[in-house]
Image: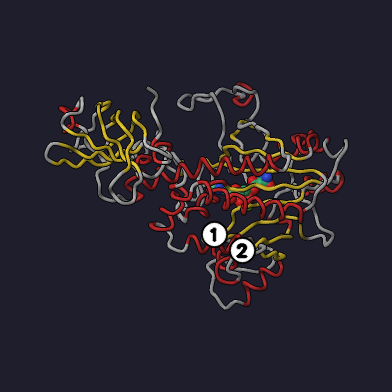
Amino acid sequence: MKRCDIAAALASEEPRDEIVIKGWVRTRRDQKGFSFLELNDGSCLANIQAVVDEGSEGFERILEMNTGAAVGVTGALVPSPGKGQKWEIKARRVELIGPADAETYPLQKKRHTDEFLRSIAHLRPRTNKFGAMFRIRSETAFAIHDFFRGRGFINLHAPIITGSDCEGAGDMFRVTTLDLGQPLPKDAVEADFFGKESFLTVSGQLSAEVFALSHSKVYTFGPTFRAENSNTARHAAEFWMVEPEFAFGDLHDNMDLAEDCLKHCITHVRTHCAADVELFAKWVEPTLNAQLDAILARPFTRLPYGEAMEILAKCGKTFEHPVGWGKDLQTEHERYLAEEHFGGPVIVYDYPKEIKAFYMRQNDDGRSVAAMDVLVPRIGEIVGGSQREERLDVLERRIAELGLDPAGYWWYLELRTFGSAPHAGFGLGFERLLMLLTGVTNIRDVLPFPRTPKHLEF
Ligand code: 4AD
Ligand code: MG
């Protein structure tokens, strides 16, 4: 007989004579002549209870069915007399599939710290909190695809190994097959696998721009890599980014898209992962629901960078980092604006060109570019994007000004030579979105296997 997910069993409309459940024991309680097993299989937050009496086949091994053991139960799905659960299983047969030692299994009943759980990344997803987290992560990925598909965007798989540095920030991981334990050959770059320098991508944007100028509306959603040595709670060396790119649109269309996308994901996840989100509202961030309601309730504030700087300069708060035209917004500034000043998401736009990447479209004032960052409470920047420079001469001048080698961008410049069109896009940090959705404050706790400086668990 086929195994039934616990989620499906608990959602059953009526009792069933025969059901097979397989999962891991969360707890076992023994009474005279029978035992209760609480099982979880990861399909939902809730456990299902199995009542196993001494007449059941396999009962002789019940004392080995400890917390953490994998077991199978066959029996009837019957109404549960216990409160809080609609159904339980009256077992006819139990099977110990994989034992777990009661003394050494690291996840016993007590609550564990996030730090400890990070050190056991192979067992962490078996806890309630991380079980919920990675169901939410999966559902949020679905919400992203659902949103863009619904708007006619084509999903593009951008390459992970690249020869170009999109952001020009230089914090890229190098890809090589050369043995670093050996002296490097002469002409190492030519001798290497691709015969040229190659890196892990920091962004799929440049590939997305190519396809925006053929398919009009595209998005990438994949892993990106940054070798920034910033050990913060918001940066990971490997993270996922959602990058829509569309032709025939401008910065304001871009803001609308980012706002709609965030709101769609919040609504979708609250609808489809209600119990999992509730866990975070109960145990992690008590104001989570109020915060998410507030984000959905009204349009995001839109604020030119210059005005943002004035607000920060006049607010009377002392910041660690200086403010003023030309200075980049730091997390402390972003959070002040989103949390304290506006009490909700803020889209800051028209940044000075000096602090933004080469590809952003220059504004008529000669000093700013059509860039935008979406800032949200608790996190700061969650989205960074821009309208791209579509004018060949302006782009060429900017590349020269920055001392970049135009030869490396020949194809990017050709896109401006043949059928150039206004286009725009953004990058949404997927982990930061998950932090927003759950109230979790450390990016390491929304990644299944976080990679940060000096940390790489298998
Ligand atoms: O602002 P960023 O650097 O923008 C780009 O890479 C553009 N090429 C995107 C585009 O226009 N297509 O990164 C975009 C977002 C940030 O707002 C942030 O949410 C996230 O990616 N991000 C990180 N998330 C986790 N760890 C890191 N180290 C991150 N760096 C950026
Ligand atoms: Mg950015």
The amino acid at mark 2 is Ala
Structural crowding at the residue carrying mark 1, measured as other residues with C-alpha within 10 Å and reported as few (<14), some (14–19) or many (≥20): some
Q: Nearer the viewer, residue 393 or 5?
A: 5
Res. 297 mark: 2
Identity of the residue furthest to the left in this view:
32
Tell me the quarter of the image containing the C terminus.
top left
Residue 57, image x, y percentages: 20, 25
The amino acid at mark 1 is Leu
Tell me the quarter of the image containing the N terminus.
top left
- Rendered residue at 74%/35% (across/down): 408
Answer with left or right where residue 168 lies relative to residue 419.
left
- Rendered residue at 58%/48% (across/down): 429
Residue 197, image x, y percentages: 63, 30
Cβ of mark 1 under 8 A from ligand 1 = no
> Contact, CB < 8 Å: mark 2 with mark 1?
no
Q: Nearer the viewer, residue 160 or 431?
A: 431
Answer with left or right where residue 377 lies relative to residue 21.
right
- Rendered residue at 59%/53% (across/down): 382
- Please, what secondary structure does the residue beneath circle 1 have? helix
Residue pointed to by mark 1: 292
Answer with left or right where residue 452 lies relative to residue 121.
right
Q: Is residue 200 above or below residue 259?
A: above
Residue 271, image x, y percentages: 53, 50
- Rendered residue at 76%/43% (across/down): 246
